[in-house]
Amino acid sequence: MLPLNTSFESPLWRKGLRVAGVDEVGRGPLAGPVVAAAVVLNPDAFPDGLRDSKTLSAKRRKAITLLIRQQAAVGIGAATVEEIDEINILQATYLAMRRAVADLPHPPDHLLIDGNRLPPYLPCPATTIVRGDGKSPSIAAASIVAKTWRDDVMKKIATQFPGYGWETNAGYPTKCHKSALQNLGVTPHHRRSFKPIHNILYQDEIGSD
């Protein structure tokens, strides 16, 4: 992984453009929303310790998120389980990204988006960066904010539906989560369009015939 630097941001900043990094979290879980964040860093002062959120502990992510919110502009967007099932996870991810950008306090001039695909209907020019959360501080900041926000959501849901381990697995298909699905069944927070959930529901339908 390349070290973080501002090589993507700097040419845009020199033009006086407001640059937002955009990243998402939650495409792979069996439960919960997909969440995106958009972050506009201050070119003259932004938090130390920015890096790919996956390389940070939960405690460190939360501490850096507080710094980001103090020193940068932040937008959050999410797509619900119902939306994921209706339009598919890729389109729901794009929807969450557009909502995150729209949630910024001021419209950005250019987006730096993690990945290799541009979401449709963006409000301004954008650049994709493969593994951008490990290269661009703006995208890294977005990845940290998005993961912290989604983890908090899953912890809250876990108190309503205990036993699935969402407070630690965030809805991903861990052994604990898959075991709970077999023993406790499918909840309203599960993505019914995802194959493991669909299969359980299909088996239940056959068993009830």
Image: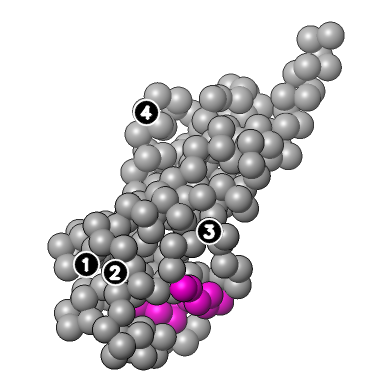
Q: CA distance from mark 2 to mark 1?
A: 6 Å
Asked whether disc 2 touches disc 1, contact meaning CB atoms under 8 Å apart, the reply is: yes
Q: Give how far apart the Cα atoms at labels 3 and 4 are.
A: 37 Å
Where does the image place residue 72, in percent across and percent down from the top left? Answer: 22, 67
Label for residue 97?
A: none
Residue 28 falls left or right of residue 99 = right
Between 132 and 99, the residue placed more toward the observer is 99
Do the numbered discs 3 and 2 sit on residues whose CB atoms are within 8 Å?
no
Dot 4 alpha-carbon crowd within 10 angstroms: few under 14, some 14 to 19, many 20 or more: few
Provide the secondary structure element on which disc 4 rests. helix
Pick the quarter of the image with the C terminus: top right
Q: Which residue is mark 1?
A: 72
- State the residue in front, 183 or 47: 47
Which numbered disc, 3 or 1, marks the residue closer to the eye?
3
| Residue type of the residue flagged with mark 3 | Tyr
**First to last magenta residue range:** 125-140
What residue is disc 3 on?
A: 121
Residue bearing mark 4 = 159
The amino acid type found where label 2 is placed reads Val
**Looking at the rendered structure, which numbered label has been put on residue 40?**
2
> Where is residue 41 drawn, in percent x and y?
26, 73
Q: Nearer the viewer, mark 1 or mark 4?
A: 1
